[in-house]
């Protein structure tokens, strides 16, 4: 069974009196352990699609089965529980709580699952170590570099052992060197922990890390292709293109 | 499910991040709670004092006073005519079933002499009933008896002020004092009673048998005359009945016809005092109500700040929702913040209120009383204010759309 199964999804937003069709009959499946990049110009519906995949929103029509469960039928609090258990989010702007320490930020999903304080701290510390931030738990976000903040966000996405990480332009606010570090962290998580990664980006060199690229335009999937060659070949070519440009 | 301590910790942290704002919001509650506590303390102190005075006068009291009479077409003022007698008093005691005690009184002012010292004081001729009626025990020696009244013996009871002025530290019981040159044996000392409702020293008095007062000290041409008769009804409910019974009995004894006015009047002292107590209670409530308005205003301040806080932290709410916070968890977080504000404000307000009422009693000399009830009331009220005014902002926060909240700048 596919981890993500999307069938004929339509999403319509009411903007005042005008109805905007953000997704117009999208169907696709993503298997466990895949690394997928979603690309497309702004307004193509890729953000709406990510919101649906992240259970932040429900489809107007069609079905979204996550791990075999139909998301469209769930209530607000049930969606919150799904997000807590199955989905880790990584955002472009990191989205850490500024007043909480790195460790407390990572603990947050555990808190909402009722994990007792002692268990929270040790799980969060382990997740921080996993992203290479062992010992930085007491720092506040403003004491960390952009790359480090994004690592904290990745640790937060990992801490519950969620099978899927959704990353929305995760390198958009980072310089090239840090972007590579973050992408390599994602690759490591995908290859070693078999975490399913779904990544929204509009940078080809970032998309090159993924094993499959899905392109959106006007609310539809216009192409869905497996990448050719090894990851190392793809990324080297992509960087070479980027540099020569 | 959600750890309460963690919630509280987050709440305190959030409040600390904006110390000035939190302090000012709390100030509203502090002033409100402080005002409630102080106003109730002033009011309760006042009614406590009034009820103490009622206690010291005696309860369920009626006062029978001689009335006005008409003399040559001119109507005289109340109490001008000596119309009440010891016989009237005895008859009331005997004939009226609703009456518990009857204390006739014939009083005057005289010089009391002991050895080389003397003291001018009020001499009260009365019966042993008067002590029961006024809840006035004897602290040393013994009271005089009905027998003393019957035989008009020359004995007396001294008030504490008289003892202090004549005897100093000496024990007066068994000693002899002279009043208008007549020797009186001191049988006992009246327990100290303090000031009356009008600030009179109640202990500056000497009690003697009423018959002795009539025959030896304040005798008039009108035999057996007394100035007033104090009556204690058996209960509050029976006071009206007692008043009616006494009226008809005295009218009969004074041979008054249907159309004649009574030559005496009866006053209900307890009613008067209770009216005073009632009005002080109303005043307490009124003060409390006015003070609660400021607590209400403080609550609105909390709501205002919480609404601002929810808007400012929209993105934080979005993040929490994204990682799995349920509606209830978000709501609890903001209610906890409002509650923390109002509770800290409440506790500080109680301390401030206690301080202010102490200052009021020190400066204005009013008696204030902080009842545990008013503290519990104020504390409970501030908790309710926190929950009530915190609920709407919290509810609003909990229903935010996570997508919009995450995108909020």
Image: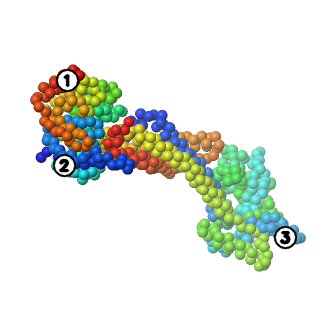
**Category of crowding for the residue at label 2, using alpha-carbon neighbours closer than 10 angstroms: few (below 14), some (14–19), many (at least 20):** some
Mark in front: 3 vs 2: 2
Mark 2, residue position: A7
Q: Is residue B342 left or right of residue A46?
A: right
Residue nearest the observer in this picture, B313 or B158: B313
Residue B17, placed above or below residue A4: above
Of the two numbered discs 1 and 3 in the rendering, the one whose residue sits closer to the viewer: 1
Q: Residue B27: where, in percent of width, then height?
A: 51, 39
The chain letter for the residue carrying disc 3 is: B
- For residue A241, the mark is 1
Chain containing the residue with disc 2: A
Query: Nearest the camera: B50 or B136?
Result: B50
Spatial distance from mark 1 to mark 3, Cα to Cα? 128 Å
Which corner quadrant of the image does residue A108 belong to? top left
Residue that protrudes farthest toward the right in the picture: B72
Q: Give the CA distance from mark 3 to mark 2.
A: 112 Å
Please name the residue that numbered disc 3 is placed on: B70
Q: Residue visible at 69% across and 55% down?
A: B157
Task: Residue B248: name its quadrant.
Answer: bottom right
Camera-side residue of B118 and B250:
B250
């Amino acid at each position: 069974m596919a981890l993500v199964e999307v069938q004929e999804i339509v999403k319509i937003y009411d903007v005042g009196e005008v109805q905007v069709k953000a997704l117009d009959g999208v169907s696709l499946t993503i298997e466990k352990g895949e690394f997928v990049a979603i690309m497309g110009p702004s307004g193509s519906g890729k953000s709406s699609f990510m919101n649906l995949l992240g259970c932040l929103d429900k489809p107007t029509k069609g079905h979204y089965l996550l791990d075999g469960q139909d998301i469209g039928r769930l209530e607000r609090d049930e969606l919150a529980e799904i997000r807590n258990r199955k989905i880790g989010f990584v955002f472009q702007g990191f989205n850490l709580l500024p007043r909480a320490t790195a460790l407390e930020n990572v603990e947050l999903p555990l808190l909402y699952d009722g994990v007792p304080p002692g268990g929270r701290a040790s799980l969060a510390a382990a997740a921080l170590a996993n992203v290479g931030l062992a010992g930085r738990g007491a720092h506040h976000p403003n004491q960390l570099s952009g790359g480090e903040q994004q690592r904290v966000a990745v640790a937060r996405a990992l801490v519950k052992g969620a099978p899927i990480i959704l990353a929305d332009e995760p390198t958009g606010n980072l310089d090239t060197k840090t972007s590579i570090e973050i992408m390599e962290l994602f690759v490591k998580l995908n290859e070693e922990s078999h975490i399913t990664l779904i990544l929204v980006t509009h940078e080809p060199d970032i998309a090159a890390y993924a094993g499959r690229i899905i392109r959106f335009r006007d609310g539809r999937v216009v192409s869905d292709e497996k990448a050719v060659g090894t990851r190392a070949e793809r990324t080297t070519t992509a960087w070479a293109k980027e540099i020569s440009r | 499910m959600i750890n309460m301590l963690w919630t509280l910790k987050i709440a305190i942290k959030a409040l600390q991040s904006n110390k000035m704002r939190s302090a000012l919001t709390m100030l509203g509650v502090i002033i409100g709670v402080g005002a409630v506590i102080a106003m109730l303390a002033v009011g309760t102190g006042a009614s406590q004092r009034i009820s103490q005075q009622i206690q010291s006068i005696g309860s369920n009291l009626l006062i029978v006073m001689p009335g006005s009479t008409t003399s040559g077409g001119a109507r005289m003022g109340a109490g001008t005519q000596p119309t009440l007698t010891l016989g009237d008093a005895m008859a009331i005691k005997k004939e009226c079933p609703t009456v518990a005690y009857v204390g006739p009184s014939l009083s005057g002012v005289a010089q009391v002499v002991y050895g080389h010292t003397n003291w001018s004081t009020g001499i009260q001729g009365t019966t042993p009933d008067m002590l029961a009626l006024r809840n006035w025990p004897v602290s040393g020696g013994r009271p005089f008896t009905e027998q003393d009244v019957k035989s008009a013996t020359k004995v007396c009871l001294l008030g504490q002020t008289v003892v202090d002025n004549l005897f100093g530290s000496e024990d007066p019981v068994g000693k002899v004092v002279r009043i208008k040159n007549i020797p009186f044996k001191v049988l006992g000392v009246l327990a100290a009673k303090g000031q009356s409702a009008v600030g009179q020293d109640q202990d500056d008095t000497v009690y003697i048998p009423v018959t002795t007062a009539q025959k030896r000290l304040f005798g008039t041409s009108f035999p057996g005359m007394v100035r007033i008769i104090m009556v204690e009804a058996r209960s509050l409910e029976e006071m009206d009945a007692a008043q009616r019974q006494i009226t008809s009995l005295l009218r009969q004894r004074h041979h008054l016809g249907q159309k004649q006015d009574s030559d005496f009047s009866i006053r209900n002292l307890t009613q008067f005092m209770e009216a005073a107590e009632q009005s002080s209670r109303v005043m307490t409530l009124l003060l409390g109500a006015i003070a609660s308005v400021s607590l209400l205003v403080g609550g609105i301040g909390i709501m205002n700040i919480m609404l601002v806080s929810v808007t400012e932290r929209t993105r934080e709410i979005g993040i929490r929702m994204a990682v799995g916070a349920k509606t209830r968890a978000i709501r609890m977080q903001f209610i906890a913040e409002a509650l923390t504000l109002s509770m800290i404000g409440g506790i500080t307000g109680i301390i401030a209120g206690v301080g202010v009422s102490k200052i009021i009693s020190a400066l204005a000399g009013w008696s204030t009383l902080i009842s545990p009830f008013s503290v519990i009331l104020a504390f409970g009220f501030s908790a309710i204010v926190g929950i009530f005014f915190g609920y709407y902002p919290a509810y609003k926060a909990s229903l935010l759309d996570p997508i919009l909240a995450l995108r909020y700048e």
